């Protein structure tokens, strides 16, 4: 992007009373957490496709995440998934992450792949199965302590496929009792983020089906329990930005799993299918600046047809673009239009920001951070993807997905 393009944009924003230096400072301070599993072979419930150079170990996942951070400057942490990322020496993992400019972030539990969880995990009628799930959660809390993580990320596949298969209420009681035990084990500095999903792999009902159910559970547990919003975990047509605004207002929005979808939980690159929705979500986050201060911004995507590193960099770039557009909304003008019930005028204020090309602004931000203005071009020039493909070959393992 040319210096002239940036100067023109800066003048346009200044004319609206927007502090460009403040916007740049916010963009430089952005923190997007990368998922370890996004660098491994992943796929659908039908098939996992092998990709040359896909990460096979936690060490390689951290190295790949470190490369994305070097290119973008805004991804200083990597989320891990247990048991997919389990290692014998967590001190060594933490030290290697630091050598790559990273820290280990959210620890994700997994109670949805072992045979023992066929009839559910935390809602299972068998107390022995629930105890096994609890032992796993307690182990994850201990891992989080060792790596310096302050977030335990929870998603459950528990549910039923047919009416009459089980009692909704009895399952709910078991679930709440279970989560109270997990909550009691949290250290003072740790939060538990509860994710919801309205279907899949259970097709009649899931035990935490929507944000309201997750929110109700959090209220029963306490202030360290918050809701995690995955953008693909909603029925078609759901107003996710409204959900975000409500949870922010209640102080219960803990974090995001960013991705995009067309039909279901597609786990596509964020911002590729519905960039307007992503912008409107960030608009609510920027509008509620104080309430959004501790929100965790994490990517959760399934890259199985696209190159792993390039896909992750593109995800980060798309999030940066949405955030930058939200930061340049003329909020004074927006409030005035809203107060006057100027429906079209208010919409035009938002759409003016959405339709603004913020790439020159982001290019300048990256240059001021000592980075290449175009992370994708920098990745292509680095030869990193070609090098790891030659060194690692085609992995026979996956990031936990069916093979």
Image: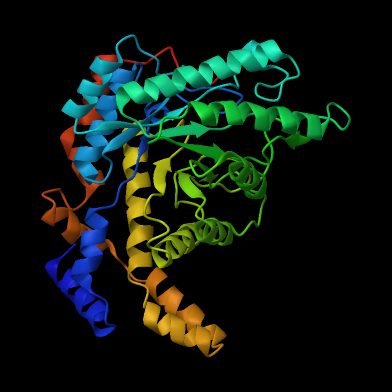
Task: Please say whether residue 403 is visible from this viewpoint.
Answer: no
Residue 89 position in % (x across, y down): 29, 11
> Is residue 308 rendered to the left or right of residue 272?
left
Query: Residue at 44% of width from left, 44% of height from top?
Result: 269
For the residue pair 77 and 129, the one nearer the viewer reads as 129
Q: Is residue 376 left or right of residue 216?
A: left
| In the displayed structure image, the side of residue 372 where residue 37 appears, left or right | right
**Residue at the extreme bottom:** 340
Q: Nearer the viewer, residue 391 or 151?
A: 151
- Compared to residue 260, the image places residue 288 above or below, namely below
Task: Give the residue displayed 16% in from the left and 74% down from the top.
Answer: 7
Quadrant housing the N terminus: bottom left
Quadrant hosting residue 392: top left
* Residue 375 is at least partly visible in this image: yes
The x and y percentages for residue 176 are 66, 33
Residue 160: image quadrant is top right
Task: Give the residue furthest to the right.
Answer: 164
The relative height of residue 238 versus residue 101 in the rendered view (above or below) is below
Give how far across and how far down residue 268 sits, in percent.
49, 42
Q: Is residue 111 above or below residue 337?
A: above
């Amino acid at each position: 992007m040319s210096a002239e393009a940036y100067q023109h944009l800066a003048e346009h924003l200044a004319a609206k009373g927007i502090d460009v230096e403040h916007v740049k400072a916010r963009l430089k301070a952005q923190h997007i957490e990368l998922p370890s599993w996004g660098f491994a072979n992943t796929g659908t419930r039908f098939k996992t496709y092998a990709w040359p150079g896909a990460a096979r170990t936690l060490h390689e996942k951290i190295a790949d995440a470190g490369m994305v951070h070097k290119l973008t400057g805004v991804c200083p942490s990597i989320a891990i998934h247990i048991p997919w990322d389990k290692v014998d020496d967590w001190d060594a993992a933490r030290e290697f992450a630091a050598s790559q400019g990273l820290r280990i972030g959210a620890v994700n539990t997994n109670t949805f792949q072992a045979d023992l969880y066929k009839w559910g995990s935390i809602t299972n009628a068998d107390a022995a199965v629930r105890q096994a799930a609890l032992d796993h959660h307690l182990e994850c809390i201990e891992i989080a302590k060792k790596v310096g993580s302050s977030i335990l990320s929870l998603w459950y596949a528990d549910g039923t496929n047919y009416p009459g298969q089980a009692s909704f209420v009895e399952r709910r009681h078991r679930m709440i009792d279970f989560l109270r035990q997990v909550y009691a084990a949290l250290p003072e500095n740790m939060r538990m983020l509860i994710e919801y999903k309205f279907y899949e792999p259970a097709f009649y009902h899931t035990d935490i089906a929507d944000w309201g159910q997750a929110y109700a559970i959090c209220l029963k547990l306490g202030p360290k329990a918050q809701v995690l919003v995955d953008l693909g975990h909603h029925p078609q047509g759901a107003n996710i930005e409204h959900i975000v605004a409500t949870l922010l207002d209640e102080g219960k929005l803990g974090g995001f799993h960013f991705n995009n979808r067309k039909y279901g939980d597609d786990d596509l690159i964020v911002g590729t299918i519905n960039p307007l929705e992503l912008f409107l979500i960030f608009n609510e986050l920027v509008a509620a600046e104080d309430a959004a201060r501790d929100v965790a911004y994490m990517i959760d995507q399934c890259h199985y047809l696209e190159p792993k590193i390039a896909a992750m960099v593109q995800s980060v770039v798309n999030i940066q673009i949405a955030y930058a557009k939200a930061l340049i909304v003329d909020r004074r003008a927006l409030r005035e239009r809203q107060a006057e019930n100027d429906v079209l005028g208010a919409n035009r204020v938002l759409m003016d920001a959405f339709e603004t090309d913020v790439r020159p602004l982001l290019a300048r931000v990256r240059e001021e951070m000592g980075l290449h203005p175009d992370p994708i071009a920098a990745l292509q020039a680095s030869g990193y993807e070609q090098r790891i493909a030659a060194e690692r070959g085609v992995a026979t393992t996956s990031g936990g997905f069916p093979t």
